[in-house]
Amino acid sequence: MEETVVHPPLSVDAYLERLKSLHTSVVADLDSALRSQIELVEKTLRAKGTGAGPAGADAAASSAHVRLEDVSVLEALEEDGREFSKELSKKVKGRLGEVVSRHINIDVGLLFEFGVGGVIRQFQAVSPEIT
């Protein structure tokens, strides 16, 4: 039988510190992964077929061209990056939106005074499922 771990409540400062730490960690991990792969591709492309030292490799690589397949890979990665950013942004907004919505109160009293209270009562929670 699994034991449920109960975490003590966090202070606002501790919560925000963990949130900022998560941001730093995700950005650093992504940067590290991209940087290492980009450096590998750069070294490979600059060294390919030059047979020269580092200075000669840079000069040869600047006038050389990559294959069309390589350009296709770059374009696919650009699209992947856009999709990844959009999906991650949607998830972050959704999850952190839960936190914000638990702490926001909207006073609709003025709307009731103007007689639109009946309309407001008709609003219902929306689910992502299609009915």
Image (cartoon, grey):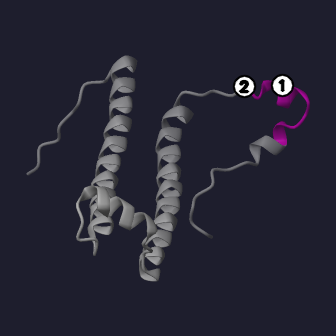
Residue that label 2 marks: 107
CA gap, disc 2 and disc 1: 7 Å
Mark 2 Cα shell of 10 Å, populated few (<14), some (14-19), many (≥20): few
- Which residue position is annotated with label 1? 110
Which portion, as a residue range, is magenta?
A: 107-118
Amino acid type, residue under disc 2 in the picture: Asp
* Label 2 close to label 1 by CB (< 8 Å): yes
Rendered residue at 68%/50% (across/down): 124
Disc 1 residue type? Leu
The residue at 33%/29% (across/down) is 18
Helix, strand or loop at mark 2: loop
Q: Residue furthest left?
A: 1
Q: Which mark is residue 26?
A: none
Instruction: Tell which of 31 and 64 is nearer to you.
Output: 64
**The magenta stretch spans residue 50:** no
The foreground one among 91 and 121 is 91
Q: Quadrant of the C terminus?
A: bottom right
Q: Position of residue 9 (x, y in %)?
A: 30, 24
Q: In this rendering, would 23 be left or right of 113?
A: left
